[in-house]
Amino acid sequence: MPVRPVRLLLVGLGNLGRRFCALLGERETDLARRYGLRFLLVGAADSRGAAECPDGLDLRRVVALKEEGKSIAAYPGVGRPDRTALDLVREAEADVLCEASPVNLPAGGEPGLSCVRVALSRGMHVVTPNKGPIVLAYPELVRLARDRGVELRFDGTVAGGLPALYLGMRDLRGAIVSRIEAVPNLVTGLLIDRLLAGVPWEEAVAQARREGQLEADPSWDLDGWDATAKLVILANAVLGVPARLEDVEREGITGLTAEGARRAAGGGLLRLVARAERVAEGSYHLSVRPRSLPPEHPLGRLGTHGMGIVYETDLYGMIAATIDETTPLPSAATILRDLLDIYVGREDSASSGVGSRG
């Protein structure tokens, strides 16, 4: 099978970006054999600089730099501390932008949002697990991708490695969704279970922070903003509802006590649940709050590292999917999944005459 090169830019080299680079390096031979694709990382950027090489950066060296606590700007010969992520996306020649920078909603989703806009405008496909741009500018970005004839993929923005969005957007076509219930945030379930095991709130939060489970701003997780952002994406992408963060009734778990958690659980599994309930044609009530899930509920037996989603529909009945995500690897792998869906999916469509862009 002939091997086709695909040139990638990567913005963001934190937990997900670094693991994605390691995954590409580990799977290079397998991806060439199974799909006829070779992904070349021709440029990468972090908060301290960028590096670009048209022939491809050495993935092992990129990973080693980040594991040593260094910037990609320290990459020998081509690293530049004076070059920003946006500079790289504006100037480098590539086929796809993989945008994995921090969510950063308080700062308008930057630099991710601007990088995504520029990449789409330049005719690059975009793959992103970054919720910020999708929450803040979903209609604009979808329209821009359509106008430029490229793909915008963001399956990793909801529930880690679980294909929650693919399931709703692709596999429930033709159905009316009457309800979505999701447990899309991992760390809140972890904290609730530790509280119930007798760990004091402050200690449970400190432990989650040491383990890298909490965002830099813990209120993003604890006050329910992360789950709210994911529900907004589900509403827009699956339900076709132009929802915003302020449209969601939100209650987090900050200040929850062990006694309060036991009371709220009431014999079920207590989790921070994102819910969309159809109230009229094209209209849904959106909420995020701690809820008790009885054992017979499809999500009622999630483990400490579990996330899941349930769709209730008129045509397909109830469909549920769950994931046990003990490391960030599945979340990082969503970038690869989206890339393969673009390239393998497009070629399948072209060969069948369905959905080809020519």
Image (cartoon, grey):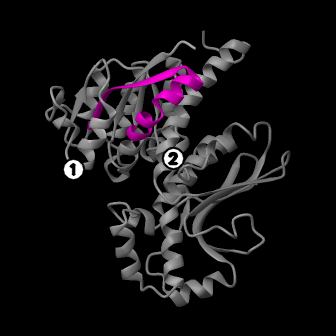
Would residue 202 be found to the left or right of residue 164 on screen? Answer: left
Q: What residue is rendered at 59% in x and 86% in y?
A: 262
Of 244 and 339, which appears nearest the observer? 339
Of 182 and 203, which appears nearest the observer? 203
| Residue 202 - label | none
Task: Give percent across and percent down for residue 338.
Answer: 54, 34
Q: Which span of residues is magenta-colored?
A: 21-45
- Which residue is tagged 1? 69
Q: What residue is rendered at 49% in x and 25% in y?
A: 144
Would residue 246 be found to the left or right of residue 99 on screen? Answer: right
Q: What residue is rendered at 51% in x and 60% in y?
A: 326
86 over 55 or under it: above or below = below
Q: Residue furthest bottom?
A: 259
Image quarter of the C terminus: top right
Tell me the kind of residue under disc 1: Gly
Total marks shown come to 2
Q: Is residue 39 magenta?
A: yes
322 over 331 or under it: above or below = below
Task: Give percent across and percent down for residue 142.
Answer: 53, 31
Task: Give percent across and percent down for residue 1.
Answer: 58, 14
Say whether residue 252 is visible. no
Q: Is residue 53 magenta?
A: no
Tell me the kind of residue under disc 2: Thr
Q: Quadrant of residue 96 in the image?
A: top left
- Which residue is tagged 2? 157
Callouts 2 and 1 close, C-beta under 8 Å: no
Q: Quadrant of residue 212 in the image?
A: bottom left
* Helix, strand or loop for disc 1: loop
